[in-house]
Image (cartoon, rainbow, N blue to C red):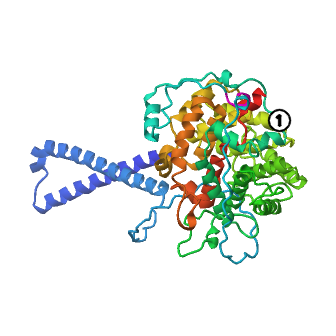
Amino acid sequence: MVHWQHGLERERELGRRARRTLLERFRNIARAFGVRRGATRRRSVGRHRLRAWSNRSIAVVGSLALHVVLIGAFLRAWSPAPPPPEEERFLEIRWVKLEKPKPKPAPPPPEPPREETRAAPKPLEIPPAPDPVPIEEPEHADVEAAAPGPVIADPLVAPAEATADEAIARLQRSSTIPRPDLASIGVGAGGGSSGGATGIEGLRGSGRGRALSLYGGSQETEDAVARGLRWLAAHQEEAGFWDSDGFQRHCTGAAPCPGPGTREYDVGVTGLTVLAFLGAGHSPEAPGLYRDAVGKALEWLLRVQGGTGGFGVEESAYFYNQAIAALALAEAYALTRNKTYREGAERAIAYIERGQQPGGGWDYGSLASGRQDLSVTGWVVMSLRTARLAGLSTSPRTLEGARRFLDAAFLPTGEGVYADSGMGAGRRGINMSAVALLSHYLLDGDPNDARARLASERILLEPPEPRALHRWSETYQSYYYWYTGTLALFQTGGTRWDAWNRLLKQALLPSQETSGHRVGSWAPEGSWIGGSGGRVYATAINVLTLEIYYRYPPLFISRRN
């Protein structure tokens, strides 16, 4: 307040000084021109008005000037300092051609320890083809005891001479598939099979020809199996395993077999190949053409198994390898009762049980990720089921957790959900319907469940189609789907199995290689799956598919008995 009063007093003083100065100058001018005081009296009124106006103007101008000075000082004191001028910069733009990234294959299983030295390639020695298995026509009494039941008329199934295209067209024209009377063919008549060696030996021995006759096999399917096993035996490593990416060292001639896979799958591919030999009755402890080959492969699996029961070094897709190797050892023990195979199988199953996720399923690795993967879980369920049949101990808690996960992944629509989180979460495809239905059966699920009926209908409407293998992202068809779909519908039985079996043979048999060094093998699928497993995987899993008629007895027969 004191500062403002002082400012006003200063303004008044300046005004008085300016007025005296102006009056003094007017008087001096008047004296210089000799103007008398009386002569100016006539203009006194004008001077008075001029003097008042000038006093007010001067006061106003002075006040404005003072306020401007004060406001400027205030702003200068409180305003921030201006930033320093920026340096001059230059922006350089370059055009770079970006290449489209290559799609990565699905994370493969762990890589097994490699042999430090590989044996030099030996000249190709292809063993002679085994004598074809005679297909016996069963007597009437035997058929009554083992056949799946009376034939049910089904307008869906085309005549025997119909082509695959005609059968598929007939399937697609049908809005609903008639449901066979499952009770009449023995499905759901009781609990699971009692286990033991007989449950896995199935009809691989003396009853093999009879099983071919009963369930739709033929001399043609047996010839394809024999050619496939011959090719696999010719490409085995001296150490006993099958090399997914290096099998071509055993090829002769100028054109080796194309289609290498990735080395991370060597454990899984070796396990699948062992299962293919075991499926045809070639045991490592019984006389046979491939006895030594199977024995060496099983020894290699035991060598690369760690003390905790896991196989090789754990990687992102480790449990594919783990489940298939455990399945091979459990089946080998069931067929031979060799204690060495039993110990390896028990440790492998124990490792699988420890790797179960909290939700009941399994992920690619053994760490607790919280993610459940139906594809991985399907292989694990196969190994657990085989271990039970072989008489190995499996935790009821593990099986209950697997059922809990499957109840969530197997939808009321008959679809299967690939994963509940992470990569591929929520994805549905016909391949997952097959895995879900097969797992449902192997975990003693109710075959009369509406989900099982709808899943079998879905699978039958997507039969094997070789052209669809190259469009996996659209069709989800692969050799793995053909295999799991075959296992699932074989357990379903009835007219559904008859229709699927005919379409399967029309798709699978003509695609087997018939010339050159590749004879007996199958080319890999034209997708990332084929690039991962390669020709060895494709051949092993297709041989397993064609062994369906005698590899395991159908569940409905086991339940009825």
Residue 466 at x, y percent in the picture: 49, 49
Residue sitting nearer the eye, 499 or 406: 499
Q: Which residue is pictured at 49% across the width and 44% down the height? A: 475
Considering only vertical position in the picture, is 147 above or below 486? above
Q: Main secondary structure of the magenta part?
A: helix
Residue labelled with disc 1: 397
Quadrant of the rendered structure where residue 429 is?
top right
State the image coordinates of residue 303 (x, y, percent, origin top left).
Answer: 82, 63
Residue 446 drawn in magenta: no
State left or right for residue 52 relative to residue 136: left
Front residue of this view, candidates 316 and 322 = 322
Q: Work out which quarter of the rendered image holds the C terminus and state it.
A: top right
Residue at point 67%, 64% (across, down): 128
The boundaries of the magenta stretch are 144-148
User: Tag 1, which secondary structure?
Assistant: helix
| 282 and 19: which is toward the camera | 282
